[in-house]
Amino acid sequence: MDAGEQHSGRADLVGARGTAPQPRQIPAPVGQETPVRRPAVRRWWPAAVWIGCGIALFAFLLRISLSFGMNSDGANNALQGWDILHGHLLLHGWIIGDATYYTLELPLYAITEALLGLSLLTCHVVSALTYLIVVACAAALAAAGSKGLSRATRCAAVIAVLGSPLLTRSGVSFLLEEPDHTGTSAIMLVSFLLVDRAPGRRFTPPLLCAILCAGQIGDATVRYVAVPAILLVCAYRILAVRKIRTADAAIMLAAAASLPLAPLIRTAMKHFGAFAMVPPSTRISPAGQWPHHAALTLMSIRTLFGVVADPRAVLGLAGVSFGLICLLAALFGFGRVIWTWRTASRSEQLLAVAIVLLAGAYVVSVLPSPNNAYEIVAILPFGAVLAARACVPTRIAGAWRGRAAIAAAALAALLPLTAAATLPVARPTAVSIAPWLKAHGLTYGIAGYWDASAVTVQSGNQVQVRAVVLPYDKIIPFDWETQPSWYDPSQHDATFVIGYPSSAGGNITPAIAERNFGRPSAIYQVADRVILIYKKNLLKELPGNQPLPTG
């Protein structure tokens, strides 16, 4: 008999590969069957755990967001999402601010409003979803290359760092009150993750170019931070290997191609009637101001990590200490990348360069101020990734060490979330004003910027309040996050003004309203606002304002 040939009629003999005959299976008695372990369960339970953790994290973030009243910045994004949901995909007629968030937050608003409708709760849900996406992207980048419990530990460490600013009122304000460059960091993290995990794939360059173009249409931060970071890191790696035909060269070309392509796409959108926007401020400040700007930048970074003296902070000094530990961990991660630059991964190099570019651009710009930490908010998730990768090794040796590490990281992640979730739910003034106006049949009026769209969204767009400003006590339309058609007296009839008892901060008062529109027919006090009702169309008496340059 030749090798590899089976005996005819004896299939259970040893075959060509020397496999032993299978033992005969004896069925178990009825009622005593042995349970069979299903491989599908073993494959799916880790995914179920991750999904459950994501849902729990979203619940925490939503509860924390509810502790801070939503303002008209987020409400304007909600109105834009509402228009997209109703078929105005290019937002024709809108004048949007210097960052549109058109490619991430506005689609999130449209999807959420399709499920929940238009309300201030929708704004809170989208803010929580946006930050959840940022956390997920940062965790994915931090966990890249890790094994076993180290992966979960790094993810928990990222959550701990990103949760540290939520212990302060300022942190909740710029992270969970409205999308203000927060979601942009997710776009940059995704582009870095793609470059790090799939550098040699054929789909990487075109996909990266598409992501960067979309990011630039939504926020210029991608153009001035993410794209240069990719160009610089890829150029270094090409020089290091002294070879042109590499994956880094293809990635570099894709990033460079996005620079002219994004403006071309924006031009095409405008040709088909898309929104106008106020160009972002890209002016460079005088060099003499840079030392002061550097000090403001350091203060903003401290604010981003929750290292601020806030009398309303949840945990007081303990919370500040926790934020300081997170900041030091991020600095350690940044320093580790610089020290081990040649052996650092692509993602680590990209994050370190992006931090330098973002902080440097902020210092030399005209943007720094004590309350502008949100302009460099991406430093927080970038630092969280570097902190997790530096403090948690790729593989944790020993089962007990792994369990201890994940337990410590989980407690650190839960500390800021559970503490911040104890804050009372805020009740913004719009919650009281909107139903009062609706009950009195007042459906169109004007107000200061911070009340106008917030009341409109709270009413579900049934009461429409349009923003005005007060240069030299003269009430005029506002051309920021608005539509000029809102102020057209042939289309709308505005019969009320929402004002304040005091003129502090440039508020509309009854005296200012009377100087502009005459004596009202009635005045009511609602919450801490004053409602002035007129028997005429106030839009006919609004003077035209000098429009801001748009692009």
Image: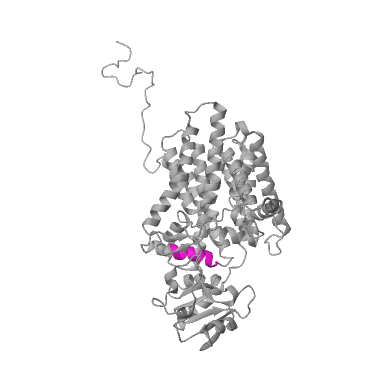
Along the line of sight, which residue is nearer the eye, 366 or 399?
366
Along the line of sight, which residue is nearer the eye, 93 or 81?
93
Along the line of sight, which residue is nearer the eye, 317 or 546?
546
Residue 2 part of the magenta segment: no
What secondary structure characterizes most of the magenta part?
Answer: helix
Question: From the image, which quarter does the N terminus lie in?
Answer: top left
- Residue extending farthest to the right is 317
Along the line of sight, which residue is nearer the eye, 524 or 481?
481
Q: What segment carries the magenta color?
A: 70-80
Say which quarter of the image contains residue 425. bottom right
Residue 76: x and y, percent? 49, 65
What residue is drawn where x is 45% and y is 57%?
108
Residue 451: x and y, percent? 54, 72
Left or right? Give the position of 275 relative to 155: left
Total marks in image: 0
Residue 73 part of the magenta segment: yes
Say which quarter of the image contains residue 233. top right
Is residue 45 visible in the rendered image? The answer is no
